[in-house]
Image (cartoon, grey):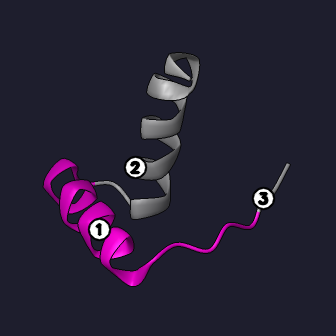
Amino acid sequence: MPTLILLDPAIIDKLKAKAGKRGIGYQTMLKIIVHEHVDDY
């Protein structure tokens, strides 16, 4: 299910940098982060 969230441009820049190092897109990077940490909250 698609979800729309608005992120600060600085956060997107950080996601893009980290994702680029892994050779993936920043949206995929965000999905990975959410998946790995959703149970922490």
Q: SS for tag 2?
A: helix
Q: CA distance from mark 1 to mark 2?
A: 8 Å
- Tell me the crowding category of disc 3: few under 14, some 14 to 19, or many 20 or more residues within 10 angstroms, Cα based: few
Query: Which residue bears the numbered disc 2?
Result: 29
Q: Residue at x 52, y 72 (%)?
A: 7
Overall secondary structure of the magenta stretch?
helix
The disc placed on residue 16 is 1
The image shows residue 16, relative to residue 18, as above or below, that is below
Please give left or right for residue 1 compared with residue 15 in the image: right
Residue range of the region highlighted in magenta in the rendering: 4-23
The disc placed on residue 3 is 3
Q: SS for tag 3?
A: loop
Looking at the rendered structure, the kind of residue marked 1 is: Lys
Residue 25, given in percent of the width and then of the height, sits at: 39, 61
Cβ atoms under marks 1 and 2 closer than 8 Å: yes
Q: Quadrant of residue 33?
A: top left
User: In this view of the protein, which residue sits in the foreground, 10 or 17?
Assistant: 10
